[in-house]
Image (tube, rainbow, N blue to C red):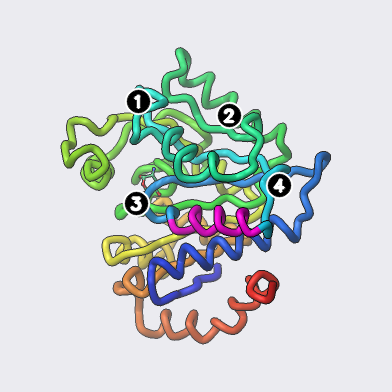
Amino acid sequence: MRLVILDTSKSVGEWAAKYVMKRINDFKPGPERHFVLGLPTGSTPLGMYKQLIEFHKQGKLSFQYVKTFNMDEYVGLPRNHEESYHYYMWNNFFKHIDIEPENVHILDGNASNLVEECNRFERQIKEAGGVELFIGGIGPDGHIAFNEPGSSLVSRTRVKTLAQDTLEANARFFNNDIQKVPKQALTVGVGTVLDAQEVLILITGAQKSFALYKAIEEGVNHMWTVSAFQQHANTLMICDEDATLELRVKTVKYFKSLMDVHSKLIEQQTAQ
Ligand SMILES: N[C@@H]1[C@@H](O)[C@H](O)[C@@H](COP(=O)(O)O)O[C@@H]1O
């Protein structure tokens, strides 16, 4: 596992965007060879999306041959509701880039048969050839996508009832009214994300520092589902200083000493 520690949450967004751009451009996507990207929502990735849009506007990056699969969506929230992940994705990212709408895949939380919707999503990922790079964020309770504490670490896309911690954390998006937060969501499983060729996880803020500690310094534990990525051969976590507050000084020093190595991961873009 790699951990890139940057000073601020802003730098996390910029670094992640440079990394994603490099991965897509190095892949050289084309009509017969789409780059398959898994995407998260939440406040953490906003800076990354902003920077990716900027790279696109500068002509450095195209999404014409990129297929996307989003991690999750609330159940029962109308698609045009400002807090739906459909709205979030189109508003914050897709409408600003050159992606083909048919290449965008977001779970439909209003489908008449939610189980079939989840199974269809898994099939679509498979038909696309699997995810090349899955980007994720985590909740303060260490969940990835909506894989709440106690989720199976081999789970697939499914309906999930949200934990109290998540309802509380996400109430801020619903006028701080916990009653307005949908109680269920559709989410990719931990196993779905583990199947990706590579996983990139963004973690910022002191409120995520205990989860980062659980993810890195303790063992794999289904009560902290992000810890499952210790078992993935190609996981890259990017965090800010605040998120390291619960880590040992030794751990932080070790990963910081690798910064020169990590900088090489985005080198081609900075040189452009
Ligand atoms: N289901 C989403 C997660 O996919 C996301 O990672 C998390 C963090 O959100 P934020 O970045 O706003 O802290 O929020 C929700 O729970």
The amino acid type found where label 1 is placed reads: Leu
Q: Quadrant of the N terminus?
A: bottom right
Check if mark 2's residue and mark 4's residue have beta carbons within 8 Å. Answer: no
Check if mark 1's residue and mark 2's residue have beta carbons within 8 Å. Answer: no
SS class, disc 4: strand
- Across and down, in percent, residue 170 comes to 27, 43
The dot on residue 121 is 2
- For the residue carrying disc 3, how many other residues have a C-alpha within 10 Å: few (<14), some (14-19), or many (20+)? many
| Residue at which label 1 appears | 77
Residue 267 is covered by the magenta coloring: no
Q: Which of the marked residues, 2 or 4, is nearer the chain's N terminus?
A: 4
The amino acid type found where label 4 is placed reads: Phe
Q: Is mark 4 within 8 Å of ligand 1?
A: no
Q: Which of the marked residues, 4 or 1, is nearer the chain's N terminus?
A: 4
Range of the magenta residues?
A: 47-58
| Residue at which label 3 appears | 139
Q: Is mark 3 within 8 Å of ligand 1?
A: yes
Q: Which of the marked residues, 1 or 2, is nearer the chain's N terminus?
A: 1
